[in-house]
Amino acid sequence: QNIDELEQEACNIEEEMQERHKEEAVSVEEELRRVVPMKKKMTTQHLNYKKALETLVKQKDYMEANRMKALCDQLEKAEISKAYQEKEQRIKFFMSQLEHRHKNELNVLRKRIGTGREELLQAKVLELEK
């Protein structure tokens, strides 16, 4: 093999790896979005509001119950938003780990290509010396 052929093959292998990494990243992100749960957890305050709401309804204090319901809904929206942000952070963390692994794989490939290039050059030099 001559150097040009080696360079072309190395370029093709590197492009294939980068394309494979892109495809893997897309599929992994889709999978994470599907399987990573959104951990919605009611706060103590929210539970207390719900209990108070039930009590107000039993007492037929509908005006105060309506106000308490609005507070519960507002708190629930905040909890859902927080759970969504936590899910997104977990996905982002997993994706950054995947990106780091891909960079390492690409660096290893580039080192192997460089080593192969050096060996070929040394072989050419030895051949020319003979």
Image (tube, rainbow, N blue to C red):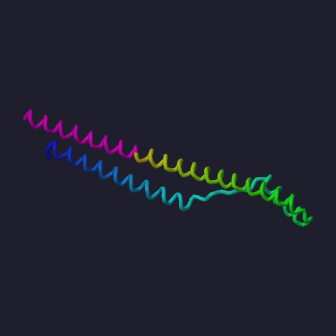
Left or right of residue 111, residue 40 in this image: right
Furthest toward the top, the residue is 129
Residue reaching furthest to the left: 130
* Residue lying at 87% horizontally and 65% vertically, measured from the top left: 57
What is the magenta segment's predominant secondary structure?
Answer: helix
Quadrant of image for the C terminus = top left
119 magenta-colored: yes
1 horizontally vs 30: left or right: left
- Number of numbered callouts drawn: 0
Left or right, 75 with reference to 9: right
Q: Which one is in front, 61 or 127? A: 61
Residue 80: x percent and y percent?
Answer: 67, 55
Residue sitting at the far right: 59
Residue 115 location, quadrant = top left
Q: Nearer the viewer, residue 92 or 112?
A: 92
Task: Locate residue 55 relative to residue 46 in the image: left or right.
Answer: right
Instruction: Give the residue drawn at x 27%, y 43%.
Output: 113
> In terms of depth relative to the viewer, which is nearer, 20 or 41?
41
Find residue 23 and report its image quarter: bottom left
Please name the residue shown 36% across and 42% down the image: 107
Q: In the image, what residue occupies the spot 24% across and 46% down?
A: 10
112 magenta-colored: yes
Q: Nearer the viewer, residue 18 or 127?
A: 18
Q: Position of residue 112 (x, y in %)?
A: 29, 43
Give percent across and percent down for residue 12.
Answer: 25, 50
Q: Which residues are magenta?
A: 103-130
